[in-house]
Image (cartoon, rainbow, N blue to C red):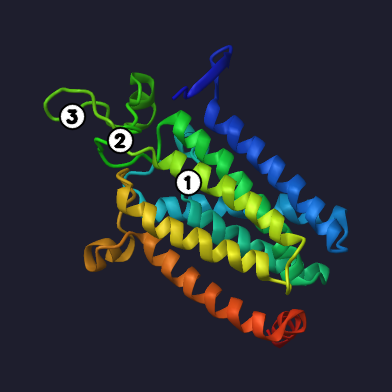
Amino acid sequence: MYPELFRIGNFPINTYGVLLALGLVLALFTAARLAVRDGLPKERIYDLGLWTILGGLLGSKILMIFTEDHVQVLSLDFLRSGGVYFGGFVGGFVTLVALIRLYGLPFWKVGDAFAPGVALGQALGRQGCFSAGCCWGKPTTLPWGVHFTEAGHANTGVPIYGTDGSDLFLHPTQLYESFTMLAVFILLVYFHRRKKFDGQILLAYGIIYSVFRFLVEFVRDDPRGDILGITSATGLSTSQLISLVVAVVAIVLFFRFRGRGTAGAEEMKSES
């Protein structure tokens, strides 16, 4: 709940930006370490990671434009915003696929190296969201409900008072995701040493995160727009619909690859 760490002159150093940058650096370092374990060139992984980060940032901004109302593209707030996660996921994934094909690297091995790092980056990034006061949850009477500060309200518009003027306590959805993804990071690193087929770690991440995101959306309460009328037509958010698609695809591929073993994943790659 500290949106701003300090200032250099009149320029604010935001907690969100620092934690997001730290998460990206640690994610890239983790991916490189795991890639070496699978016999992949560390230098190429760093190269892939930097371009994937740029593609992810671009994708998150593009989806933000389509899902959020009154977005001022040519503004400092737009540049500082993290955007919409699933847009970043798709943008980063497309960039990664294109560069893997360009460099001639094995897709599923690279994906397995990157997946734990992505989870770690999310864990730190959502701590940044919590500090900034964005991505907040619905009001709750649970003992771990959080009351944001005036600084958080001024920064993101997070509600801090109820209709009766009393302090408003919200689901800490940012912390739900942060702690969950930290646990997922540990789990994926553990299974990376014991994986039975290439693609297992990436697909496990896709399944776990999609299911979690689908569920946590029920207690999210920040305004995120209604792209193509999805929410009004289905009662589900845009992120929930994307979660369903990703989960179904990941589950189908997971069981298909598990039946074929490592060779099956590589065969699938060559077929595509």
Residue to which mark 1 is pinned: 177
User: Would residue 52 be visible to someone looking at this image?
Assistant: no
The span from disc 3 to disc 1 (Cα, nearest Å) is 25 Å
Identity, as a three-letter code, of the amino acid under mark 1:
Glu
The span from disc 2 to disc 1 (Cα, nearest Å) is 15 Å
Q: Which mark is residue 162?
A: 3
Q: Give me the residue at 75% from left, 56% from top.
A: 48
Q: Is residue 145 above or below residue 65?
A: above
Which label's residue is closer to the chain start, 3 or 1? 3
Q: Give me the residue at 38% from left, 62% from top.
A: 240
Q: Is residue 127 left or right of residue 24?
A: left
Identity, as a three-letter code, of the amino acid under mark 2:
Leu
Locate the N terminus and report the quarter of the image it occupies. top left
Q: Give me the residue at 47% from left, 36% from top.
A: 129
Q: Position of residue 84 (x, y in %)?
A: 46, 50
Which label's residue is closer to the chain start, 3 or 2? 3
The span from disc 3 to disc 2 (Cα, nearest Å) is 11 Å
Q: How many marks?
A: 3
Badge 2: residue crowd in 10 Å (few <14, some 14–19, many ≥20): many
